[in-house]
Image: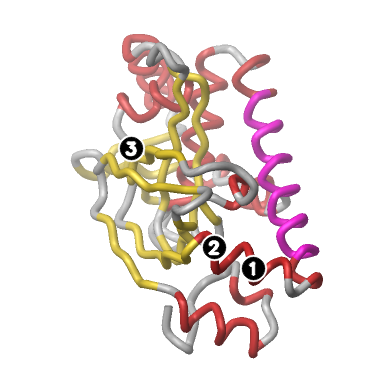
Amino acid sequence: MKKTCENAFCSFLPEDERQLMCSQAKTVCYSAKQTCHLKIGGEGQLLIISSGCLFIVRTRLDGRQLGTEVLSKGEVIGLTNLLRNTRDLTFYTNTDIKGCLIPHDFFYEFCLNRPEIARIIILHISLRHARLINKMEHLTLDNSREKILYLIQKINYESSISDSRIFAFTHEELALLAGANRVTVSRAVKQLKQQGIITSVAKGKFRLTESYYNTDYFARQR
């Protein structure tokens, strides 16, 4: 993390606190479409996302999928594990990722000695929780087409290239996020194409129709 920090999370910190975080951080990059692993909690690290979009996949002990989450710039992986033992976390990079690794022990002490940081952390976790509840409502109550459209809009908001409304996804990624099979996803995507809601612009890249480019809806969850 450089002194001219690009991190949305750190932008909330006072200048002296930001400089202290910078002194302990290590800049990391992950390529798109990769499965990555990170030790969080206890003797692990936190990852603050500077740019890009990734998916966290949580599984049961028997390997079955428990849940997924889409995270992008400003999000902190490992923040909810500050008081827990070390464990491995798996995430999948939808786009190229740039971020900062912060030692867990340093961040824990950093928070204990600065009560004002607690407000920032509570706000961050509260917003993330609200987004998860919103996602659960969509995936529980919507039909297959509505679920896939919601996820496409969310991925588009989190990872679109500038203001072009162009974004990349695979049917496998949508199936993973929706907890659905690939056949269901392919059928829903075909319907959305036929209705002109999304159009293919290149292999694996799509454009979302302007009337469905719902940035305000997702921005309010930030």
Residue 113 is situated, as x and y percent measured from the top left of the image, at 73, 73
Residue receiving disc 2: 105
Residue 100's image quarter?
A: bottom left
The answer to whether residue 158 is visible is yes
Q: Is residue 160 left or right of residue 120?
A: left
In the foreground, 206 or 136: 136
The quarter of the picture where the N terminus appears is bottom left
Q: Which range of residues does the magenta coloring cover? A: 118-136
Q: CA distance from mark 3 to mark 1?
A: 39 Å
Name the front one of labels 2 and 3.
2
Residue receiving disc 3: 169
> Considering only vertical position in the picture, is 130 above or below 178?
below
Q: CA distance from mark 1 to mark 2?
A: 6 Å
Q: Is residue 65 left or right of residue 147?
A: left
Q: Secondary structure at mark 2?
A: helix
CB-based contact (under 8 Å), mark 1 and mark 2? yes
Q: Amino acid at mark 1?
A: Glu
N-term mark: 3 or 1? 1
The quarter of the picture where the C terminus appears is bottom right
Residue drawn at (40%, 11%), measured in percent from left and top? 62
Q: Secondary structure at mark 3?
A: loop
Residue 125 within the segment the image draws in magenta: yes
Residue 115 is situated, as x and y percent measured from the top left of the image, at 80, 70
> Considering only vertical position in the picture, is 42 above or below 106?
above
Magenta span dominant secondary structure? helix
Q: Total marks drawn?
A: 3
Q: Amino acid at mark 3?
A: Phe
Residue receiving disc 1: 109
How packed mark 2 is, by other alpha carbons closer than 10 Å (few <14, some 14-19, many 20 or more), is some
